[in-house]
């Protein structure tokens, strides 16, 4: 089996992973959106990784989805709403037994990908690393963190897992990846929408703790009732810890809205509300928050799903 890492999406996380894998000599190929982006990348000739004051360049080969050649291992590094359509384009190239590593935040996109590629192994990831694009083809590694990877359908460790350690990508194989993803989703639901609605840094929510606590209580009840009781443990305390630890930061959703980028609302708060409805759990606070957020996005001309 080929050991090439194909990477779908050379945005922030895709570029960060691509550069670190390439740095240790792993075979990496970027899959770019279209011929125009490919020509643009080829003109630049390389990805640039900036870590604190250190800048390094990597001339990683790139192609579009229409290129020839089988794909055995694919890191899906686009936004949640682009993941399934992006994988669908690559279906003719997915080799039997292909493995897909899904970096998307939130929940729902993983099932969409599994539906379009039912024969591939889908490995879910939850990342607390932080990266952003400073320029075209240039990514800044802004926040050291950790990556948990796991496959809810198959506990076996993938053969390539040591590639991550070799590349300096901090990662652990997780047998409870859904718990991790639900826990992060709950934190994001309690913090991110309110930072958009109140127009504040995460620390600004210390002035709205009543609202935060009410959401935390509903989220914990939802987690317990939808089969994720572990993700509910001391959720309230962790929400407050995260608010304090990231008080000076703007949440990812706040940053998306400020930059007029589409948010991942459908896979965060939207997923929580849909799951609550499916399980018959009353979540009036989350539903009201969802409506307020949809109205705010619509007023700004941004997609609300
Ligand atoms: P990004 O917008 O920076 O990058 C996504 C890239 O995918 C873009 O370059 C886009 O053009 C490309 N893309 C979309 N569809 C494509 C297609 N069909 N073919 C080829 N390229 C395609 O996004 P990001 O910040 O890297 O986030 C990716 C995911 O990781 C999101 O779900 C995000 O929530 C999650 N995440 C990001 C960070 C971070 O620090 N950036 C941290 C944790 C989790
Ligand atoms: O993950 C986050 C985000 O901004 O998306 C934190 C910092 C935890 C806030 O929810």
Image (cartoon, rainbow, N blue to C red):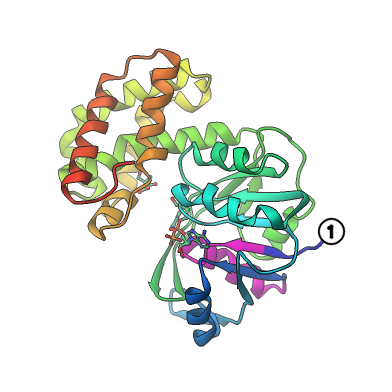
Q: Position of residue 66 (x, y in %)?
A: 63, 66
Tell which of 169 and 150 is nearer to you.
Answer: 150
* Quadrant in the rendering for residue 259: bottom left
Q: From what the image shows, is residue 75 above or below residue 242?
A: below
Whether residue 40 is in magenta: the answer is no
Q: Secondary structure at mark 1?
A: loop
Q: From where the camera sits, is residue 49 visible?
A: no
Tell which of 260 and 148 is nearer to you.
Answer: 260
Mark 1, other Cα within 10 Å: few <14 / some 14–19 / many ≥20: few
In the picture, measured across the screen, residue 196 lies left or right of residue 142, that is: left
Quarter of the image for the C terminus: give it: top left
Which residue is found at the position 40% from the left and 20% from the top?
276
Which residue is found at the position 54% from the left and 47% from the top?
84
In the picture, measured across the screen, residue 284 lies left or right of residue 199, that is: right
Q: Position of residue 240 (x, y in %)?
A: 31, 36
- The residue where tag 1 is placed is 1
Q: From what the image shows, is residue 102 above or below residue 278?
A: below
In the picture, measured across the screen, residue 60 lies left or right of residue 2, that is: left
Which residue is found at the position 47% from the left and 52% from the top?
82
Q: From where the camera sits, is residue 154 visible?
A: yes
Q: Main secondary structure of the magenta part?
A: helix
Quarter of the image for the N terminus: give it: bottom right
Q: Position of residue 270 (x, y in %)?
A: 36, 33
Tell which of 257 and 242 is nearer to you.
Answer: 257
* Quadrant in the rendering for residue 242: top left
Whether residue 11 is in magenta: the answer is yes
**Across the whole image, how many numbered discs are drawn on residues?**
1
Which residue is found at the position 53% from the left and 19% from the top?
227
- Residue at the right extreme of this rendering: 1
Q: Which residues are magenta?
A: 6-25
């Amino acid at each position: 089996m080929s050991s090439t890492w194909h990477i779908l999406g050379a945005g922030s996380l895709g570029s960060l992973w691509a550069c670190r894998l390439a740095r240790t000599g792993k075979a990496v190929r970027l899959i770019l959106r279209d011929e125009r982006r490919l020509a643009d990348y080829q003109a630049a000739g390389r990805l640039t990784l900036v870590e604190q004051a250190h800048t390094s360049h990597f001339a990683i080969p790139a192609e579009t989805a229409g290129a020839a050649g089988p794909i055995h291992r694919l890191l899906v590094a686009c936004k949640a709403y682009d993941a399934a359509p992006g994988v669908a384009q690559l279906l003719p190239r997915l080799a039997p037994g292909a493995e897909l590593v899904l970096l998307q935040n939130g929940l729902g996109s993983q099932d969409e990908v599994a539906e379009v590629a039912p024969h591939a192994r889908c490995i879910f990831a939850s990342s607390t690393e932080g990266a952003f694009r400073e320029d075209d083809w240039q990514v800044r590694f802004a926040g050291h963190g950790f990556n948990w990877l796991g496959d809810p359908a198959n506990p076996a460790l993938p053969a390539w897992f040591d590639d991550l350690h070799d590349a300096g990508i901090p990662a652990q194989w997780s047998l409870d990846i859904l718990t991790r993803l639900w826990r992060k989703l709950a934190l994001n639901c309690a913090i991110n929408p309110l930072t958009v609605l109140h127009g504040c840094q995460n620390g600004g929510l210390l002035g709205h703790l009543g609202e935060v606590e009410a959401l935390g209580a509903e989220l914990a009840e939802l987690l317990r009732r939808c089969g994720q009781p572990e993700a509910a443990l001391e959720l309230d305390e962790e929400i407050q810890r995260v608010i304090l630890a990231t008080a000076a930061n703007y949440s990812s959703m706040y940053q998306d809205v400020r930059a007029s980028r589409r948010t991942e609302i459908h896979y965060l708060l939207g997923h929580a509300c849909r799951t609550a409805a499916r399980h018959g759990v009353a979540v009036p606070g989350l539903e009201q928050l969802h409506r307020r957020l949809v109205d705010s996005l619509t007023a700004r001309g941004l997609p609300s799903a």
